[in-house]
Amino acid sequence: MGGLYNVWDYREAAKRRMPRAFFEFLDRGTEDGHAMRANRNALEAVKLRQRILQDVRHIDTSTELFGRKLPLPLATAPTGVADIIAYRGELAVARAAGKAGIPYTLATSSTTLMEAVVEAATAGCWLQMYVWEDREASYSVAARAQCAGMEALVITVDSPVLANREYNSRNGFIYPIKARPRLVADVLSHPVWSAQTLGRYWMTGGLPRYANYPDDMSGKVTRKVSRRANSASVTWDDIARFRDFWKGKLILKGILEPADAVRASKLGADAISVSNHGGRMFDAAPSGLEMLSEIVRAVPSSMTIFYDGGVRRGLDIMRALALGAHAVLIGRATLYGVAVKGEEGASHVIDILTEELRRGMGLAGLTSVSQICSDCLWPPREVAR
């Protein structure tokens, strides 16, 4: 695609194309942005050894995840904004993930019926959810997901209270979304995006509505709905109950402490995602990458470990794997793609990351994902796996 050679190019194109309020909702972190910057700083600080004169004609990027062979050590991270930055963006990213052969994670705050997303995500679909104050409402959504064929439940555990995102208030981008003067002016100054996204929704039944909340919590994104908030009362006892209830794979997302990772393992979680929520929650948090090797050493080797946060290059995937992750979740990267070119853009972003991963492996003298380990790190460090 002309001029779009990497994820950063897609980010800049999305920034030009979208109203500021919508772009910043997608792109920024929380408060002063320290945690978000920590993700990139930590990734860029990891150096990998370069081995020469290796036969790298045949490079295999496949891996095994939950007993299934995948072409890439990737899955999409849950993101609740795809449908408001691109027309039917959730289905577009789900189809792109399916074409690439990687699992798609649907956020509970999505505006597309989970049953439709399961059908579109042909390489597997996972559901992300928060545990609400009304536990029965949470169980009802999880039960529906199980019936729909969701293979994994991803419980986000790092959000007991709402984050402080002051830029949303400054931009007039506050839920429920209303025609506030600043927001209206912002939207009108981007007529192409407005016509192709908001205009298409108006022509096909109106703006999206939350599709997977219980009936009394649903509604359009322009209307205030009872989401019962992310519950500040959620404890490990709730996780144990979900483990008993949920028959598929259980993933806890947002773990940064080794002790919490160990407890998740003891409660029967199949996997954890070492993550600071993309820098969008606690601005004093370290990057998940800074905590990754310590967490890997703390948990049993049988536990699957994901990393997410700040991944923009195929080399970032290599860095996370070398520090002990089994796979990486990508969120903003595919959103930049879908914001610019829809499904085609999301697919292109995944293709870019794939090619960068292959190139990086070749330059490091590696021919399989299984070879990406602590031996690749410089300076050397201990990472159990």
Image (cartoon, grey):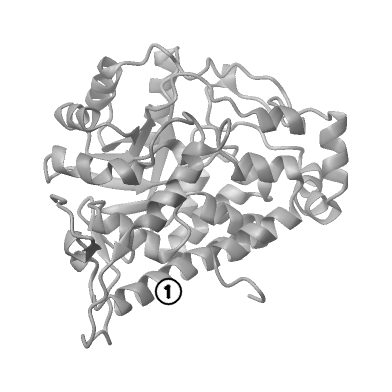
State whether residue 309 appears in this view: yes
- Where residue 37 appears, as percent x and y from the top left, is 50, 45
- Where residue 167 appears, as percent x and y from the top left, is 68, 33
State whether residue 77 appears in this view: no
Give the SS element for disc 1. helix
- Where residue 221 appears, as percent x and y from the top left, is 68, 30
**Relative height, residue 346 to residue 190 (above, below):** below
- Where residue 380 appears, as percent x and y from the top left, is 18, 59
Q: Quadrant of residue 144?
A: top left
Q: Residue at x 64, y 49 (%)?
A: 88
Q: Residue at x 84, y 30 (%)?
A: 179
Depth order, front residue of 200/61: 61
Q: Answer left or right for 115 relative to 317.
A: right
Q: Residue at x 41, y 32 (%)?
A: 285
| Amino acid at the residue labelled 1 | Glu
Using a 10 Å C-alpha cutoff, classify the residue at mark 1 as few (fewer than 14 neighbours), some (14 to 19) or many (20 or more): some
**Relative height, residue 133 to residue 165 (above, below):** above
**Relative height, residue 100 to residue 89 (above, below):** below
Report the quarter where the N terminus lies: bottom right
Q: Answer left or right for 312 relative to 327.
A: right
Image mark count: 1
Residue bearing the label numbered 1: 355
Q: Answer left or right for 82 relative to 383.
A: right
Q: Residue at x 79, y 27 (%)?
A: 178
